[in-house]
Image (spheres, rainbow, N blue to C red):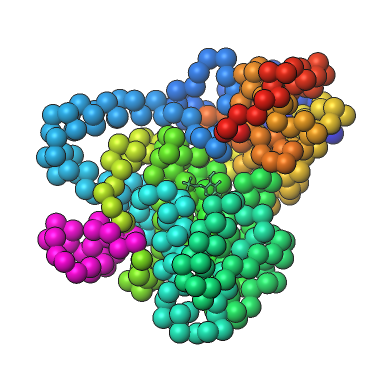
Amino acid sequence: MKTQVNQVGQNGDPQLAQGGTTTREQCLVLDATDPLGFTRRRFHLPEGVIYLDGNSLGAQPLNAAAAMQHAMREGWGDQLIRAWNSHDWVNLPSKVGAQIAPIVGATAEEVIVADSTSVNLFKLLAAAVTMPEVANNPQRRVILSEAENFPTDLYVAQGLSALLDGKVVLRTVPRAALRNAIDDSVAVVLVTHVDYRTGHMLDMSKLNADAKRAGAMVLWDLSHSAGAVPLALNNDGAELAVGCGYKYLNGGPGAPAYLYVKQHLQSQLSVPLSGWFGHRQPFEFASDYVPAADMRRFLCGTPSVLGTIALETGVRCFEGVDMARLRNKSLALSRLFRQLVEAQCGALGLQCISPDADDERGSQLSFSHDHAYALMQAIIGRGVIGDFRRPNLVRFGFTPLYTRYVDVWDAVAVIRDVLEQQSWRNPQYQQQKTVT
Ligand SMILES: Cc1ncc(COP(=O)(O)O)c(C=O)c1O
């Protein structure tokens, strides 16, 4: 398929037409007129690198180093313990949660930053299955998930099932069968909104409605959605969600994650990890646990201050960004990439496995190849960074805040060259590293 991407719509958003051939010059025009072009300057992006892995680790916000340095020098360095008050560190989880809220379509009181996604999955899953309505109903004992869900989601559910002596069990079905599998045995549906391997995106509103009809709750993992696609948790009827801070939110390696709990549910959920920061008055040092009435009950121990400060700089990169416009650019970038790859690399063994339909796809594309690992290493060796996922996928993420149309064009030229030259056959690319 040939590509044409040389039109700019009246509102400034790109209009991609089918057919024709996109030139590098046309990509440069799209970049010059890109209504989101201003956000790229908010990031540190190394020379000579085209970064298509913001779905694994977002690029570094330009302000991150200065914010960290400020926290290190004036905060930790000079203020020492006083900084918990003078720099308001104690309220960082709520403050940064409130900044994430508009990105996910929630109110400021419904999101808090804490721990890792895995830990937050445990907290909310455990809280959901121990609600009296569920715990007192022997029929409702299933955590329903997708067989190909991100492993940590499944591991956490397995661990919880073992902890509860099998009173709840994990049942997995193919992603396509999820909606039909929700029946009155299901307590919680545990799903990832955008699939990490294929980029397939579920219809949040429909799945929430199905679950509600069956009396089940849904726990959404938004790791591959938040910051990449517009989310409307409130409007789409979502009750529980968690997500990563280090992917499209640009919070840095191992950034803290976040949780969302719909307002009316917050006081009904008990978190088994009842640490002192979830207490109503942590600094009363009372001997008995009384949870905070609001989202703070989903905290556990002392917040990761430096990590949360870095995350804040990442989240602030969304200031002034219209999420519908961000989505338009994400789709335009990924359509362009797909069309160029299919036109130039299709005969060279790359096969797109991501959904074709825009409304079924997040902001990534995955392609199968018989030598996917070595291929990705060779592509990275040429300065185009994506990643590899088992068994045979190369994965590319499009971060509209900093990916340009010309990056897409140049990246595909590199991929085609690597495939044509078969440079992935070089032995240096065959040795699998620990992190892929
Ligand atoms: C969908 C999904 N959920 C959870 C995680 C892991 O989150 P964490 O390492 O913060 O526990 C990842 C990591 O890539 C992920 O892709």
Q: Position of residue 106 (x, y in %)?
A: 42, 57
Q: Quadrant of residue 311?
A: top left
Residue nearest the observer in this picture, 175 or 264 = 175
Is any part of residue 321 visible from this angle? Answer: no
Q: Quadrant of residue 119?
A: bottom left
Residue nearest the observer in this picture, 195 or 277 = 277
Residue at point 34% right, 38% down? 307
In magenta stretch: residue 279: yes
Q: Position of residue 24 (x, y in %)?
A: 70, 19
**What is the quadrant of the N terminus in the image?**
top right
**What is the quadrant of the C terminus in the image?**
top right
Residue at point 41% right, 51% down? 258
Residue at point 28% right, 52% down? 301
Residues shaded magenta = 273-298
In magenta stretch: residue 399: no
Residue nearest the observer in this picture, 154 or 5 = 154
In the image, taking residue 280 as reference, residue 206 lies left or right, namely: right
Give the main secondary structure, helix, strand or loop, of the magenta stretch: loop
Residue at point 35% right, 54% down? 112
Q: Position of residue 376 (x, y in %)?
A: 69, 27
In the image, taking residue 410 as reference, residue 303 lies left or right, namely: left
Q: Quadrant of residue 128?
A: bottom left
